[in-house]
Amino acid sequence: MANHKSALKRIRQNAAKRLRNRYYHKTARTAVKGLRNEVNKEAATEQLSKVISLVDKLAKKNIIHKNKAANLKSKLTKHVNKLA
């Protein structure tokens, strides 16, 4: 266990940030899953911009890697374009 006040504070801050990052990551994963399960092209196109925005925000905050964000956006865009 940490002995210094600053180390104790750092532990508290890290715990709060970890919870916040888990929330953001889980929210984005749920949004991605919803988009992948969408069969209506109009609804999927509408959702795509929101999901891309979420993924970009995660990459900007270093919650996910920028290349992973780019790969996700590419795959989701291909999926939406394939819908009939």
Image: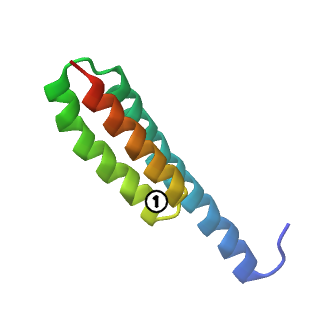
Left or right placement of residue 67 versus residue 53 in this view: right
> Where does the image place residue 53, in percent across and percent down from the top left?
30, 52
Quarter holding residue 4: bottom right
Q: Is residue 50 visible?
A: yes
Measuring 52% from the left and 63% from the top, which residue is drawn there?
A: 62
The answer, for residue 27, to whether it is visible in the render is: no
User: Percent position (x, y) of residue 77?
Assistant: 32, 38
Amino acid type, callout 1: Ala
**Residue 79: quadrant of the picture:** top left
How did the renderer colour the structure? rainbow
Please, which residue is most extreme toward the left here?
42
Classify 51 as above or below 36. below
Q: Which residue is mark 1?
A: 59
Residue drawn 23% across and 45% down? 49
| Quarter containing the C terminus | top left
Residue displayed at 23% across by 29% down: 44
Residue 82 location in percent, x, y?
Answer: 29, 25
Q: Name the image quarter holding residue 41.
A: top left
CA neighbours of label 1 inside 10 A, class few (<14), some (14 to 19), many (20+):
some
> Secondary structure under badge 1?
helix
